[in-house]
Every structure is written in C-alpha cells, then in structure tokens.
Amino acid sequence: MEPQPDDVDRIVDAWRRERPDLDVEPLHVLSRISRLARRLDLDRVQAFAQHDLEGWEFDVLSALRRAGDPYELSPGQLVRQTLVTSGTMTNRVDRLERRGLVERSPSPTDRRGVIVRLTGEGARTVDAAMADLLARERTLLAELSGRDRTDLADKLRRLLGPFETETNPGTIPTTTPDTTTPDPEASKELR
C-alpha cells in the first residue's frame, strides 16, 4: 500500500514546480528528519517537565546514571560527555547540588579535584524521566515494525557516523531539548 502524501511531499512538489532547476530530492529525507526532531524535542521537554527537569539537567543526571554504580564522574568527564565548558558545568553542578540531585566529594586520587555523584533522589528522578521519555519515544515509533526500526537506526547511524564525537571529537554542537540553538559556550570549544 502506497503511503498517503504528507506536508513534505507537498513542499517538495512546490519547490519542483517553482524551481525545476534544483535537485530537491534531499528534502524528502532531511525535512522529515527535521520535523521528527522537533517532535522529539517537544516530547523530551514534556517528559522532563513532568519530573521538574530541564534538558540540560537530564543530560548531566543521565551521564552520571550511565556511569554505573557508584554513579559518579569528575567534572571533566561530565564536560566531555555533555559538550559544555568547564565554567558551564560548574554552574550546572552547583544548581543540581542545590536541588539535592547530585553531591560533590573530594577526589580520592587528586586532592585538588572533586567527584560529582548522583544522590538517591537524583537517581530516582532521572530513572523516572527516562522511563517517561522512552514511553513517549515508543509511541513515536509505533508505526514501524521492529525490523523497520532496526533498518532506520542503521541508516541514520551511517548518516551520523562522520559527525560522531567518538570518531571526530568536537564536531557536533550540543543542542538540548530546552533550546533550539546550540550552546554558545560549547560552540566556542568546538572551533
């Protein structure tokens, strides 16, 4: 069964009509990705708001949670995982600490350094926010079979590969769900 035309099809058709000299084929894929990204950003904002979190707070808490027991990282490790400056991270940790979601303790290996650790409340909050986010994301993907999701993930991985931070550090500016523009501090670091 042929899918029904959508808004992107109408936009592409209009561009073809108005500018037949342009190859507008990329719009078929990338405009849909852009529209889905906006939808995902909205879902993330809503999921995090239900748990009194902003996107950047979730980013820091989830980095600590993914670190595994005892759920701690150095500020430098958090900077690398969230692509913000050390000054920005200090401010973020301060704010999360005031909320009781993280705590600082002296580094056991560097007496000048500290370790940032997820508190019990921080772990409960990020776990609940993650569960809510995943439920929303499952709803977004419900139209696709398991095989379709796997195929789509593989294709998107190929598109993202050249930009990934693990293979090419500093090439992706960070955009958090609570904003539509890259973090200016992170962009400075990436130049």
Image (cartoon, rainbow, N blue to C red):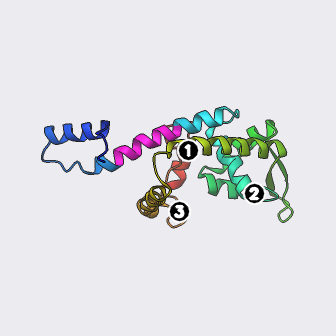
Which numbered disc covers residue 137? 1
Task: Pick whichever, 157 or 21, lies toward us.
Answer: 157
Amino acid type of disc 2? Leu
Instruction: Kindly state the secondary structure of the residue where label 3 is placed.
Output: loop
Give the overall secondary structure of the magenta segment: helix
Residue 110 covered by magenta stretch: no
Q: Which numbered disc, 2 or 1, marks the residue that appears first in the sequence?
A: 2
Amino acid type of disc 3? Pro
On the image, the x and y values in percent for residue 156 come to 44, 58
For residue 7, side relative to residue 86 (left or right)? left
Q: How many marks?
A: 3
Which numbered disc covers residue 102? none
Task: Pick whichever, 139 or 55, lies toward us.
Answer: 139
Residue tagged by mark 3?
169
Task: Pick whichever, 172 or 7, lies toward us.
Answer: 7
Q: CA distance from mark 2 to mark 1?
A: 28 Å
Up-down: is 7 above or below 137? Answer: above
Location of residue 66 (image quadrant):
bottom right
On the image, the x and y values in percent for residue 125 come to 75, 41
Residue tagged by mark 2?
73
Q: Residue at x 63, y 56 (%)?
A: 81
Magenta region, residue range: 30-41
On the image, the x and y values in percent for residue 158 come to 42, 63
Instruction: Kindly state the secondary structure of the residue where label 1 is placed.
Output: helix
Q: CA distance from mark 3 to mark 2?
A: 19 Å
Q: CA distance from mark 1 to mark 3?
A: 27 Å
Q: Residue at x 48, y 60 (%)?
A: 150
Outermost residue, front side: 1
